[in-house]
Amino acid sequence: MGVAHTTDSHHGAGHRARLRTRLLEAGGDSLLDHELVEYILALAIPRKDTKPLAKQLLAHYGGFSALLTADTENIARQSGMGETSTAALKIVQAAALRLLSEPVREQPILASWQSLLDYLRADMAHLTIERVRTLYLNSKNMLIRDEIASEGSIDQAAIYTREVIRRAMDLGAAAIILVHNHPSGDSAPSRQDIAMTRDIIAAAKNFGIAVHDHIIIGKDGYSSMRSAGLI
C-alpha cells in the first residue's frame, strides 16, 4: 500500500517548518529577505511552495522595501499572485508603517525627528510616482494631520500654496512640514522645489504659520532644505 499524503503537503512544507522554528527561536534577523517574503506568502498560499515566487518578486521589484511599497494592483498582476497573497504583503507594509509612525504621532515632531525620517523613507523612498504630503502641527509641534496633498506623474506633482495655507488655517495649525519624493532616486532639491518652498514660507508667514522644513525623500536617502540652509 502507498503512503497517504494530506492535501496540504508539498515538498516545501518541511522547509517552511524550519523557517518557522528559526523565526521563533532566533528572531527575524535570522531570515534572509526571500525567506521573509516566502513565509509571508505561505500564510496566504499554504498549499504551495512559495520560495520560487518570493525570489521572483524580489528580483522583479529590486528588493524587499521596493516590493512591499509597490503599487497594489501592480503586485496583484504578477504571475502567481492574487488578492489574498497581495493583501498579505500589504498588511505587513501597513503594520511596519504603523510601528514606525507611532513616535511621530505621539511625541512632538521636532523631538522625534529621526523617527519621522525613518517613517517617511519607509513609506515614500520606492514610490514610482511623485507624492506630496503636508504635516500639520499644533503650537506644541504635535502632529495634527498627515495628508497627501497630491500625486503626480513619474517626475512631477503640484503643490498649491493657497491650498496648503487654507488647509493649515482650517486645522488651526501653527506650523507645517512639507514632504515629497523624487522617483529618480536623487533626493537633492531642484530649483523648482526651492522656489515653491520659499513661496509657501512667505505666504504662511502672513498668517503666523511657520514652515519648519521641506524634506525630499529619495532612494539615496533624504534632503532637508532647512539643514542645507536653503530656507
Image (tube, rainbow, N blue to C red):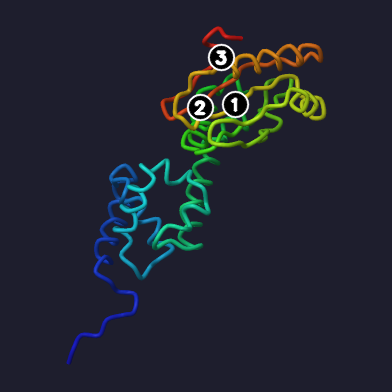
| Marks 2 and 3, the one that precedes in the sequence | 2
Q: Which residue is mark 2?
A: 217
Q: Is residue 168 above or below residue 228?
A: below
Q: From the viewer's perspective, is 227 left or right of 140?
A: left
Q: State if disc 3 and disc 2 touch (CB < 8 Å).
A: no
Q: Position of residue 152 (x, y in %)?
A: 61, 36
| Residue at x 64%, y 16% (from the top left corner) | 212
Q: Which residue is mark 3?
A: 225
Picture disc at residue 179:
1
SS of the residue at dot 2?
strand
Looking at the rendered structure, the kind of residue marked 2 is Ile
Dot 2 crowding, Cα within 10 Å, few <14, some 14–19, many 20+: many
Looking at the rendered structure, the kind of residue marked 1 is Val
| Marks 1 and 2, the one that precedes in the sequence | 1
Between the residue at mark 1 and the residue at mark 3, the CA separation in whole angstroms equals 10 Å
| Residue at x 33%, y 61% (from the top left corner) | 50
Q: Position of residue 176 (x, y in %)?
A: 69, 22
| Marks 1 and 3, the one that precedes in the sequence | 1
Instruction: Write down the quadrant of residue 231 in the picture.
Output: top right
Q: From the viewer's perspective, is 16 left or right of 82?
A: left
Q: Is residue 4 above or below residue 133?
A: below
Dot 1 crowding, Cα within 10 Å, few <14, some 14–19, many 20+: many
Picture disc at residue 108:
none
Q: Is residue 128 above or below residue 215?
A: below
| Residue at x 57%, y 9% (from the top left corner) | 230
Q: Position of residue 175 (x, y in %)?
A: 71, 19
